[in-house]
Image (cartoon, rainbow, N blue to C red):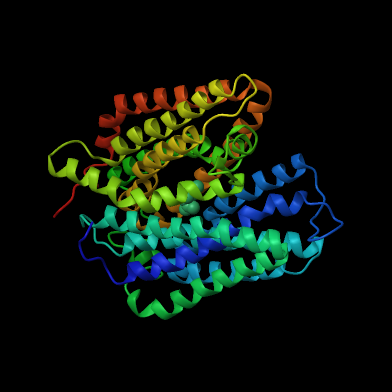
């Protein structure tokens, strides 16, 4: 991890950190704002819980699904670098539109943010890959560092934007998220000198080894197939993991004993815990895999993803433990929740940054951005799936759902371990590192 990285990496790190600050800040207060009554201090929209959760579900899905048009814009017209800038502008415009208190500005603001994240998020991730040549052994570590940046933004935002939004006024919270994004744009503009070589538009006819309409080679096709299969893994992963904002959040509020030294920690604060764990354990997990690699043991991305999904799933077994403890109507110990998030994050670190890096290794150059777009769209579907699973828990019971997630993830991971060698063959050595 302590190798030198390209100068462009800190620029992309800080830009994405501020974008995530803006995104997670908004996410932290959206449902609270929607459900707050329309009268009294700091009024909200007065929606029912159900209506608010439905909008929340659509919003968190669409921000990622719009990565597909974002990827197409980059591949066809603008290149990734300019599309990221356009995305940042749209997000900042969206957040600042939300500062104005009206239904029309509310929906306009959300649409602007959705389009903006769609332009920015996949393309900035592809640019990280672009900083490294094929076979560069620093690529995975680069993505882990980038992922830590994401989570610094994600950890700080619910605390800062959440506090300002709830205490001083929702619209100040939205404004602050907008200012965060503008800071990100500032970093990005300033750092252009370090990004000269990366994310530029390449006209189709200039893409290495291709003529305009030349079909993909057999190797490229195989690689696209593996990528598409890995997107199924991603849907399952985020479908389980993204319980954090919904079911786990409500469970924490209602059934976890949050008293520490005589002080009751608000449930919303726990939303920052996974992001803090990513920051703390990010390099350790990456180093663990690197060490294994040096020992000549299996460390292909697909293998890591299989292990990641099983470890993350085990986190839900901790929640089953909590439900058993609270079965008599009492509250469960906090340690269950903390252990659950810890295992979920260790799993996340073996899958999420790895998947980003994997896509940049496998995607054919002319589809580089769109493949990343489809990846994020898959995470969007995962988010929606998570909402449905969370809703199901209301009728099926929490113990059943938490345990069900654990068993499903375990079996899914085992199935992947059974087939990963076959899938690896389809990558045609794209992961071989030329040190
Ligand atoms: N937590 C990561 C981020 O915010 C991953 C999100 C996702 O892929 N759904 O970038």
User: Would residue 135 appear left or right of 8 to someone viewing this image?
Assistant: left
Q: Nearer the viewer, residue 12 or 262?
A: 262
Q: Nearer the viewer, residue 336 or 105?
A: 336
Residue at point 58%, 46% (across, down): 265
Quarter the N terminus occupies = bottom left
Residue at point 33%, 67% (across, down): 9
Place residue 42 in its image quadrant.
Answer: bottom right
- The outermost residue toward the right is 39
- Counting from the top left corner in percent of width and height, residue 214 is at 36, 54
- Counting from the top left corner in percent of width and height, residue 248 is at 57, 36
Residue at point 30%, 27% (across, down): 417
Place residue 50 in its image quadrant.
Answer: top right
Q: Is residue 73 above or below residue 7?
A: above
Q: Is residue 75 above or below residue 267?
A: below
- Counting from the top left corner in percent of width and height, residue 209 is at 27, 59
Res. 83 visible in picture: yes
Q: Nearer the viewer, residue 9 or 338?
A: 338
- Counting from the top left corner in percent of width and height, residue 98 is at 71, 65
Q: Is residue 198 above or below residue 227?
A: below
User: Would residue 186 appear left or right of 224 to someone viewing this image?
Assistant: right
Res. 373 visible in picture: no
User: Would residue 141 appear left or right of 257 to someone viewing this image?
Assistant: left
User: Would residue 283 appear left or right of 236 to someone viewing this image?
Assistant: left
Q: Is residue 419 above or below residue 130?
A: above
């Amino acid at each position: 991890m302590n190798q030198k990285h390209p100068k462009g990496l800190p620029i992309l790190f800080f830009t994405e950190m501020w974008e995530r600050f803006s995104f997670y800040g908004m996410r932290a207060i959206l449902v609270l704002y929607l459900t707050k009554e329309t009268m009294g201090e700091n009024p909200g929209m007065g929606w029912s819980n159900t209506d608010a959760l439905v909008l929340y579900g659509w919003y968190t899905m669409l921000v990622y699904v719009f990565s597909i048009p974002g990827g197409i814009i980059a591949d066809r017209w603008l290149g990734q670098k300019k599309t990221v800038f356009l995305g940042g502008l749209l997000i900042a415009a969206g957040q600042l539109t939300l500062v104005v208190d009206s239904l029309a500005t509310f929906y306009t603001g959300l649409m602007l943010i959705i389009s903006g994240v769609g332009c920015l998020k996949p393309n900035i991730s592809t640019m990280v890959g672009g900083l490294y040549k094929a076979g560069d052994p620093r690529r995975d570590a680069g993505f882990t560092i980038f992922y830590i940046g994401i989570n610094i933004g994600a950890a700080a935002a619910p605390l800062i934007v959440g506090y300002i939004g709830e205490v001083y006024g929702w619209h100040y919270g939205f404004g602050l998220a907008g200012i965060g994004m503008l800071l990100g744009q500032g970093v990005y503009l300033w750092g252009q000198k370090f990004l000269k070589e990366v994310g530029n538009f390449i006209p189709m006819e200039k893409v290495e080894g291709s003529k305009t309409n030349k079909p993909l080679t057999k190797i490229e096709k195989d690689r696209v197939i593996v990528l598409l299969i890995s997107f199924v893994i991603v849907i399952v992963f985020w479908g389980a993991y993204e319980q954090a904002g919904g079911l786990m959040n409500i469970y924490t509020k209602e059934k976890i004993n949050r008293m520490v030294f005589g002080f009751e920690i608000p449930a919303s604060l726990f939303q920052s815990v996974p992001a803090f764990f990513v920051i703390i354990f990010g390099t350790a997990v990456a180093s663990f895999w690197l060490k294994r690699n040096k020992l000549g043991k299996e460390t292909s991305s697909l293998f890591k993803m299989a292990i990641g999904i099983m470890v993350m799933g085990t986190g839900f077994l901790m929640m089953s433990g909590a439900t058993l403890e609270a079965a008599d109507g009492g509250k469960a110990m906090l340690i269950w929740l903390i252990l659950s998030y810890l295992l979920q994050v260790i799993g996340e670190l073996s899958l999420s940054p790895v998947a980003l890096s994997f896509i940049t290794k496998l995607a054919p150059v002319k589809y580089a951005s769109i493949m990343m777009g489809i990846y994020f769209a898959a995470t969007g579907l995962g988010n929606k799936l998570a909402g449905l699973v969370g809703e199901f828990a209301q009728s099926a019971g929490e113990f059943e759902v938490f345990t069900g997630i654990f068993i499903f993830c375990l079996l899914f991971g085992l199935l992947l371990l059974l087939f990963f060698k076959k899938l690896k063959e389809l990558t045609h050595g794209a992961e071989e590192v030329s040190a």
